[in-house]
Structures are given as structure tokens and as C-alpha cells.
Amino acid sequence: MSRTDDVVDSIKRMILDGVLRPGDRLPVEKDLAESLGVSRGALREGVSALSILGIVSTRQGDGTYITNLDATQLLAPMGFVVELHGQGDPRHVHSVRRLLESEAARLAATRITDEALRQARDLLGESARIVGQAPHDHERLIEIDIAFHRIIAAHTDNPVMVGLIEAFARRTVRGRLWRSLHEEGADRRTHEEHVAILAALAARDPERARIRMANHLIGVEESLQRLPTTATRRPSPCPADLGPGEGRHGVTRWGHGAMTGAITSPVGGPRRTANGRGSPAARSPWC
């Protein structure tokens, strides 16, 4: 094991043992290097690695601090694994997503707040208007899709599940957008399935919510089996790589206790079409 690995493991152990807590500042470099028995160079490399992992953050001129250790951020590196395997056979990724999100719907059915249900209804009200128009704003429908699923995940009261769902969901946007653009009737079916999921949540029926979510995602999986291989390969840049809060219409960050799933821009407000010029785009800039 390298000295850099020693630094990483030692600081992780200090966090696990409660010596360092979220928001704490690391000791000055000289003192920390001496206490860990490593050189300053090895300490800097270790801190850099911890920064990439989302465990520490360095503030210019102020020092290095332990982050809030949010599970979504800490699990973000899983996105590479999801993307790597999704390129070969996206069914593997989507089947795991189905398992996670079906359980999330079951958990959320007894925990979701009335305010979150209202926000979900507002989102689906907007999607109903869009699917009733021609042409559809496919980008906006995908954003609504993401926000709707985030509301459910955020009300599982399980930060690890939220982080795992985020890792999978961010890497399935491309295929879902391809389906929206190319499969006739897909947008309306998605909307109707979301309405059924919301009805189960509003009824506080965990088993029905789980089944409705599973049925919805099985349909998505079946559609994606017909995807051309290029539809799952990542060009750069692509909004599938954006973190929560970086969407075109301001979809908020999500995580345990971090959000209710609302979108920051007014629901039903003016929207650009996919090419941003008020007319339908032949190819969305999302991919």
C-alpha cells in the first residue's frame, strides 16, 4: 500500500471513529502529516484523492474541510460503472434501476408529504399539456420525468437508496430521450404510467405503488431493447453527465433531506423547445 493510500485510509478512519465530522477543518498540513507519519507530498496526494471522492473540499486560502458526506455525492463514482456496463447491454442497468425504484415507490407511499404530492401533480399537469400538443417538447418531458422520479426517491428516507438511484438514473437519460424522440406514443404512455404511480402514492398503497412503478420501468426496458447501439453511447458533453441542479429548466438537487423534488422554475411557465428557438429540433442537444 502506498503512502497516499495510507493518508486516504487514515482520514476515512478518523471520520468513521468520529474524530472528524462533516464540516470539520483538517489540521494544518504540517501537523497532520506528522500525526499520520507521512510526507507533505503524500498528504497532498491523499487529500486530492479524497477530494475526488467527495470526502473533503479545499477552500482557497481557508483550508481543507470534511464535506457534508452526502450519500448521493459519495456514490457518484458508481456512475462510471453504470455507464461502462450500460454501453454493452443497457438492459442490465435498467433492470437494476427497476429494482431500486420499485422499492423506492413502495417506501415513499407511506412517507411522501402532501406538499410533494402536490408538486408531483403539478409536474404531471404540465406533461399532460405537452403530450397534448404537437410537436412535443421532448427535452422538457424528460426533465419532468427526472423530477417526478426524484420526488419519489427523496421520500424513501433512505439516503443510500437515493444515491444509488441517482447513479443509475443519470446514466439512463440518453436512452429515455431516444425513446421519447423515436417511439410513437411513448410520451403519452409514460405520462399515463406516471399518473397511475401518483394515484397509488396518493392512496398510500405501498404494494400498488411498487407494482405500478415496476410495470412502468418494464415498459421502458422493453422499448430500450430496440435501441440502436449508438443511442446508449456517450458523446461529450451530454446533460446525462450533469449533476442534480444542472438541468436546462432548473431541476433541483436531490438527496436525503435535501429536496422535495420540486423544480425551481415555475411549473407551466414559458419553455423553449429542444433547439431553443421556439421550433422543434430534429435532434435534441441532450445527446
Image (cartoon, rainbow, N blue to C red):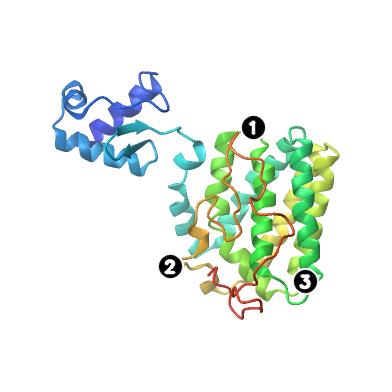
Q: CA distance from mark 3 to mark 2?
A: 29 Å
Instruction: Indicate left or right for 60 with 178 as reference.
Output: left
> Which residue is at a point 74% across and 75% down the rendered structure image?
184
The CA span between labels 1 and 2 is 34 Å
Q: Which tag, 1 or 2, sits closer to the chain's start?
A: 1
Q: Please state which amino acid type lies under the numbered disc 3.
A: Gly
Return the residue at label 3. 185
* Closer to the eye: label 3 or 2: 2
Asked if the residue under mark 2 is in contact with the one under mark 3, i.e. CB atoms within 8 Å, the reply is no
Q: Residues within 10 Å of mark 2 (few under 14, many from 20)?
A: few
Q: CA distance from mark 3 to mark 1?
A: 34 Å
Q: Relative to residue 201, is residue 234 depicted above or below?
A: below
- Please name the amino acid that badge 2 sits on: Ser
Residue with the most extreme left position: 39
To which residue does mark 1 refer? 157
The answer to whether residue 16 is left or right of residue 219 is left
On the image, which quarter does residue 286 sit in? bottom right
Badge 3 marks a residue whose secondary structure is loop
Q: Which residue is mark 2?
A: 236
Q: Residue drawn at (56%, 46%), measured in percent from left and top?
A: 253
Q: Position of residue 75 (x, y in %)?
A: 47, 42
Please name whichever residue, 174 or 277, is drawn nearer the observer in this view of the structure: 277
Q: Residue furthest bottom?
A: 282
Q: Amino acid at mark 1?
A: Asp
Which type of secondary structure does the marked residue at label 1 adopt?
loop
